[in-house]
Amino acid sequence: MTTFLEQAQQLLAQMDEREQQLALTIIQRIGKHQGYGAAFTWSLGVVYEDVQPGRSRCSMQIDPGHYNPAGIAHGGVAYSLLDTAMGSAFWTALERPLGCATLELKINYLRPIVDGNIIASAELVERTTRFGILTGRVVNEAGDLLALGQGTFAIINYPKE
């Protein structure tokens, strides 16, 4: 039976230097996670800056692992950060055992994201008995607006533990 390290060495041996560097970047992002969120957001490097009922702010440091072939951050990076900010804003506004799931999220991309720290903020606009409507924005450290979004999140019952 091979150990985790042996499996990792076998995979790394099959990669070129650039791929190895990207793998290391992802492992470093996961190692910095804050103990909450999920593996997907850990792998992106999402940091939960401020989460309160109905409001949230999350950030991430852009690096080459987020780039598309054109050399700018893939659109899914801003989308995922915005979805995470909206979801955490709504999640904290719900009483347990209620939770939420994204029904739809519309995003307008306004500027390309190349590097630096990006910040997503989200706010709960309206809540009904079945869903919530949230708005959000993604900015860079200079405050330039990079993307705007609006999302609808379903209220769901989580199974009892």
Image: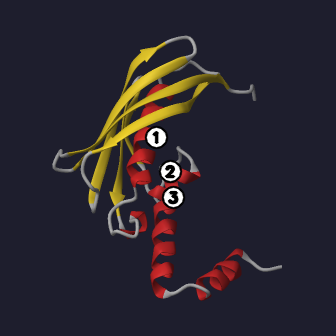
Q: How far apart are marks 2 and 1 (CA)?
A: 8 Å
Location of residue 50 in the rendering, given as x and y in whole percent from the top left corner: 36, 36
In contact (CB < 8 Å): disc 2 and disc 1: yes
Question: Is residue 48 rendered to the left or right of residue 14?
Answer: left
Three-letter amino acid code of the residue under disc 2: Thr
Mark 2 vs 3: CB contact within 8 A: yes
Which residue position is annotated with label 2?
41
Q: In this view, does 70 lie to the left or right of 30?
A: left
Residue drawn at (40%, 41%) of the image: 82
Rounded to the nearest angstrom, the CA distance separating label 3 from label 1 is 13 Å
The three-letter amino acid code for the residue at tag 1 is: Thr
**Residue 84, numbered label:** 1
Of helix, strand and loop, which one carries label 3?
helix
Q: What residue would you read off at disc 3?
A: 43
Tell me the crowding category of disc 1: few under 14, some 14 to 19, or many 20 or more residues within 10 angstroms, Cα based.
Answer: many
| Mark before the other along the chain sequence, 3 or 1 | 3
Q: Residue furthest toward the top?
A: 129
Image coordinates of residue 78 in percent, x first then y, are 38, 49
